[in-house]
Image (tube, helix red, strand yellow):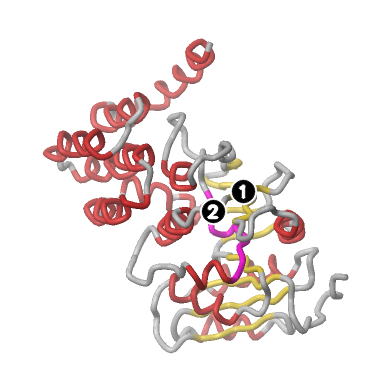
């Protein structure tokens, strides 16, 4: 039986881990959305990533005994904060929540119900979410993994030119605590920590993604982070860093995932930086080490040769032609 609101369970059913630093208003919103869950038998662990009196003071205003706050002595990054929060967790299940995201009230209850009947010993239970940007709401991911589809392929490959296909938002995941202990977040990465963690978890083989039966989104990914997807694709710096990560993780990827990531995720950074000498080496690497589809190559050529202002028109044409192509 769930505990009553504001009652501290001896062993909670879910531990919520929220890393934060220097964003007191946002983290208060995230914490309150966690404490307002219909599943009341939980604890909320906020890892303040380094000295931050404004955030600590804001959180002291909340008197809920289910809230635990730890201020780390130095700033180490979100990966270290998540690992530390998972290490402190008392529940068998951990739900990750970024400080600028929000949960709808039934999110944890629906996920836990799915997790507890899962045939997998260590499932990743996900939900759809609202990507909110510039006054518009997009419901992602657009599709669920196909039967037997490798996790790396689901999150890195594309079957259409539109964003939001295989996006697994960190704030939409529920996992066993032991999974983070076995596969901690990489402390060395400045970016791509979430994607890297999913790739390494998926490479274990026995871990798969399951979605709650309800198709309705249960998380709000605010416009403040919507541009994170573009950070990977169009960062004005660091595309070689992204390429280095991809090469380092290539042994964990399918050929399909590698080539799609190379041509559709990382190449746009080179385009943005104007490094046109990379065009042929990147394309050659995709064929030498991967298995690109016609769509991968087409999207790669669009990135290099089609001005941004023309791309919405191309997308509209694609949508009109797609039914005929599928027939």
How far across and how far down the image is residue 292, in percent? 32, 31
Q: Is residue 231 visible?
A: no
| Front-most of residues 274 and 125 | 125
Q: Would you identify the image quadrant in which residue 302 lies?
A: top left
How far across and how far down the image is residue 180, in percent? 52, 69
Q: Would you identify the image quadrant in which residue 197 lies?
A: bottom left
Mark 1 lies on residue: 129
- In the image, what residue occupies the spot 19% across and 34% down? 284
How far across and how far down the image is residue 19, in percent? 52, 72
Identify the disc placed on residue 315: none
- In the image, what residue occupies the spot 41% across and 21% down? 313
Disc 2 element: loop
Number of numbered callouts drawn: 2
Is 271 rendered above or below residue 248? above
Q: Which residues are magenta?
A: 168-177
| Front-most of residues 256 and 302 | 256
How far across and how far down the image is residue 62, in percent? 70, 81
Gap in Å between the C-alphas at discs 2 and 1?
8 Å
Report if residue 174 lies within the magenta region: yes
| Front-most of residues 161 and 180 | 180
Is 93 rendered above or below residue 161? below
Outermost residue on the bottom side: it is 73
- Name the side, left or right, on which 73 lies relative to 40: left
Report if residue 239 lies within the magenta region: no
- In the image, what residue occupies the spot 54% across and 40% down? 148
Disc 1 element: strand
Closer to the chain start, of discs 2 and 1, is 1
Q: Label 2 neighbourhood size at 10 Å, few (<14), some (14-19), many (20+)?
A: many
Mark 2 lies on residue: 169
| Front-most of residues 195 and 202 | 202
Quarter of the figure with the N terminus: bottom right
Outermost residue on the left side: it is 277
């Amino acid at each position: 039986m769930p505990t009553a609101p504001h009652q501290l369970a001896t062993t909670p059913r879910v531990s919520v881990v929220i890393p934060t630093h220097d964003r007191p208003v946002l983290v208060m919103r995230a914490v309150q959305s966690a404490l307002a869950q219909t599943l009341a038998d939980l604890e909320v662990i906020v890892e303040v990533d380094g000295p931050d009196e404004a955030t600590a003071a804001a959180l002291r205003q909340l008197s809920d005994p289910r809230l635990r706050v730890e201020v780390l002595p130095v700033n180490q990054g979100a990966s270290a904060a998540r690992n530390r929060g998972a290490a402190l967790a008392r529940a068998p299940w951990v739900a990750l929540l970024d400080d600028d995201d929000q949960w709808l009230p039934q999110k944890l209850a629906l996920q836990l119900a799915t997790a507890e009947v899962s045939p997998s010993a260590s499932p990743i239970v996900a939900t759809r979410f609202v990507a909110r940007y510039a006054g518009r709401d997009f419901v992602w991911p657009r599709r669920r993994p196909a039967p037997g589809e490798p996790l790396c392929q689901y999150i890195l490959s594309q079957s259409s030119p539109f964003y939001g296909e295989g996006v697994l938002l960190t704030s939409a995941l529920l996992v066993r605590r032991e999974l983070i202990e076995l596969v901690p977040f990489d402390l060395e990465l400045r970016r791509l920590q979430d994607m890297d963690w999913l790739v390494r978890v998926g490479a274990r083989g026995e871990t798969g993604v399951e979605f709650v039966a309800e198709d309705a989104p249960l998380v709000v990914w605010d416009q403040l982070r919507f541009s994170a997807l573009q950070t990977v694709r169009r960062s004005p710096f660091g595309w070689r860093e992204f390429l280095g990560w991809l090469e380092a993780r290539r042994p964990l990827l399918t050929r399909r995932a590698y080539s799609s990531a190379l041509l559709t995720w990382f190449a746009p950074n080179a385009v943005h930086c104007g490094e046109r000498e990379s065009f042929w080496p990147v394309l050659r690497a995709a064929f030498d080490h991967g298995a690109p589809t016609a769509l991968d190559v087409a999207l790669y050529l669009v990135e290099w040769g089609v001005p941004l202002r023309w791309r919405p028109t191309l997308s509209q044409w694609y949508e009109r032609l797609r039914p005929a192509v599928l027939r």
